[in-house]
Image (cartoon, grey):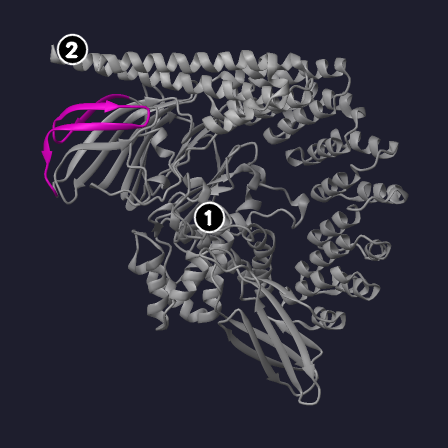
Amino acid sequence: MKSFRIAFLVAVCLLTAVAHHSLALAEEALCTCRYCESASARLGFGVDLGDDGPHYAPVRKVDVQHIKLDITPNFQERTVGGTTTIRFVPLRKAIDVLKLDAVDLTITSVEGSTPVSEFDNTSKDLTIAFAEPIPVGQESWVTIKHHCQPQGGFYFRTAEMGYPEQDTHCWTQGESHYARQWFPCFDYPNEKSTTEVICHVPSDMTVISNGRNLGESIDPRTNMKSVHWLQDKPHVNYLICVVAGYFDKLEDAAGKIPLGYYSQPTLSEHAANSFQDTASIMNFYQKEIGVAYPWHKYDQVTIRDFMAGGMENTTITTLTHNTIFTPATENIRTSRGLDAHELAHQWFGDYVTCEDWSHLWLNEGFATYYTHLYEGEKFGRDAMLYGLYRDATNRVLRNGANDKRPIVWKKYRNAGEQFDYRAYPKGSWVLHMLRSQLGEEMFREAIQSYLKEHALTTVTTPELQAAFEEASGRTFDRFFDQWVYHARHPDLKIRYRFDPKLSLAQITLEQTHKVDDDVMLFNFPAKFAFLCDGEVVLHTEDVTEAKHEFYVALPAKPEMVQFDPEYTLLAKVDFDKPEEMWINQLENAERATGRILALEALAKKKSNKAIDAIQKSLETDPFYGVRVEAAEALGKINSDESRAALRKTATPNDARVRLALVKATVGDYQPEEVSTLLQGAQAEKNPAIVAAWIEGLAKYSDEPVSQYLRASLEQESFRNEIAEAAVEAMRKSGSSQYVPDLAEQVARHADNYTTRGLASLLKTLASLSDEKQEKLQSLGQIAPHLNDPREDVQKGAIEALGKLGLEEARPILQAYADASHNDQLSKAAESALATLTKDSTPQPTELIELRKQMQDLEKSNDSLKKKLDELEKKLEATEEKKD
């Protein structure tokens, strides 16, 4: 064993020496050879060796019945400590070892109902050995004392971190596997238990958690408040949540269900805007789903600089503080969609939970679809279908065209890869197609049965399929196979001809996508609507082949032929029809989606007749979404006639349409219209629309525009929206004339900017700085923000240093690249160094690549050395034990 250790050390040293020697030779000679590139290929530098699955839910050796957390967050040191008690029962066979997930936790003691003989914690887990095996079915417990300064899972927002002191708070985020970073647990969604939280905070703070508040008390000696929460129905580990700090609260109710809305004191005056729909959403879901809200209460809490939009923790949803808005933006800003999505999760994701991440769509697809259903409940069916249209067009059809991954996919490298368009909008569309085929009542029956049968458990997709089959009495094997277990969507080419002698419509429908092992030939009902002398004739064909041709007898030649009139099929459709038919569809289609599809086709025609029809729709269509799409269609045409049509359109009352009209108006370069555009911008009061004007004016260098952008930097608006839009416009302009103005903002007004806005300000200042002296001055202003306690600002400062292109920034960036305490900042620094190297004095590609390889090798050697040291210690301990 000792000889192996010596040989191993020699190998490491030789590998390092060879690499350093190669770099020395490279700097002298690699200008004229390709050795570096070929060596990189042979040695495998930079190859991602991560686990690519397939991934399955881990086998449960015990049934976790209850988790009790007794914790104390320290806001000054940003640490959390306490005890975790886990009550469990062994399954199938006796256990003498219990292994828990525990990342970078310091474990100070472990006790159990069965004596603990030993425990060991690494940077990833905690292993507990019992003095004797615990038999199957015997209820047992362990109590673990621990503390940590968490790098994830548990977060603080304090004055020392750059936040208002009166907004001080902390919170937890468990999904997907982050709870293990602040307490030991079985951190996977196929385990459910009841939970309990006791949290100790200063007496003037508020604590919110899952379930029921059992009470609170204040210790007069320490002036610390203890708040006790109990979640008495089982839920998965990632849904455990604790939020503590200073909050203002609004209260409401949906029937007997108490609703609480918590927000930071500096934002609370506007909080009511964000939560105005919650009670209505709750009432609708209970009626639509057919299962009563399954928990005791429902709270929503805003979080400063939350990493996502929201998180559906059981009975307590955490939300980004950006969900709060003011009435100044009229109907452009709304929290309704986020509110509806997270509330739907209380049934789909919390009450019934996906067993592993390959079935994530059972959580996210449902939450996305029921958000659309609520939109339809509140504003009509067109509103629901418009949401589905935007999801299909902007996300599924675009992202899924070249993606061979199905919805249920087990070969992910990490759980985060599953949180994409497949789980959210495509999963939603699968449910919409099922509802369209079954009908609303049968769909509700299936969903109600699914939830009741699997209440408070975890599920996989076959359980949902079984519910639909039981309710309908038909098989859905093919449907789930093509839409859920295989990738993509159909591409359809549709052609129409009319035989006037026989009064027959001839339809040819062809599936043109490539069919292979990953993508099936689709089987679906194809629906057509024919408008003949004011009468609508409906016809449905079951498509089962690659090419399907059929005839439909009609009373007269149709003025309109529409495919999928109710918008029930997820597909990319190429339907070549005469312009007149598209205009008739724009004027006569019952559903807004049919009219929107007509707008898409007419925008490609670009004729004066098409432009007139689109402009008429922009002014007169009864549904706002059609008017929005009409404005966008005119903007895409980009002709003198389309611009004239935009200019003659009356200013819409609906702010959403007005915003679309502004974006279309300023989209093209129109130097002769600068004065008119500037007048429009200065007349607008809605800050969201002002921001759109500002963005569009970025392409003009006229002095009045420059003055307007400078003045916009000083204009007050909620969350600094207008000033931050001006910064973005200055960046897009590419003009160094704004450097003094940006420098002034950094020096005197940095506190006015949001976290993201300040990062953007720093990067814009860097990218516009021109001469060497100006760059050095900007370096002096950017560098201090490397010490900002907010990670996103630090990353912005690091990226800005890369954009400066100064060699003086290299040592600073290298220090961050070499640091191991924060992977995100280290990666940002490496990327900035690459940018800096690319922009500096040209060097041979081979030399740059070899330097990168050396950096990777040095990191690998550090890791190797740590593993070797650990191995040596274990060997020495083993040898001492033998002696």
Q: Earlier in the sequence, mark 1 or mark 2?
A: 1
| Residue 579 is inside the magenta segment | no
Horizontal side, residue 103 vs residue 623: left or right? left
Name the secondary structure under disc 2.
helix
Question: Quadrant location of the C terminus?
Answer: top left
Residue occupying the point 61% across, 74% down: 508
Residue at the spot x=33%, y=24% of the render?
Answer: 123
Where does residue 278 sit, x and y in percent of width and height?
49, 51
Give the amino acid at mark 2: Glu
In the image, 455: left or right of 654?
A: left
Tell me: residue 521, above or below residue 701: below
The foreground one among 274 and 712 is 712
Q: Nearer the viewer, mark 1 or mark 2?
A: 2
The image quadrant that residue 82 belongs to is: top left
Of residues 775 and 401, the one drawn nearer to the viewer in this rendering: 401
Residue 342 circle label: 1
Locate residue 40, reporting x and y percent: 51, 26
Q: Please, what is the three-letter code of the amino acid marked with disc 1? A: Glu
Predominant SS of the magenta segment: strand
- Depicted 883 relative to depicted 235: above or below: above
Q: Is residue 280 visible?
A: no
Q: Quadrant of the N terminus?
A: top left
- Give the tally of numbered discs: 2
The location of residue 457, given as percent across then percent down, is 29, 51
Residue 366 visible in image: yes
- Please report the residue visible at 50 percent of the width from the left and 18 percent of the height from the top: 854
Q: Which mark is residue 880?
A: 2
Residue range corresponding to the magenta coloring: 107-136
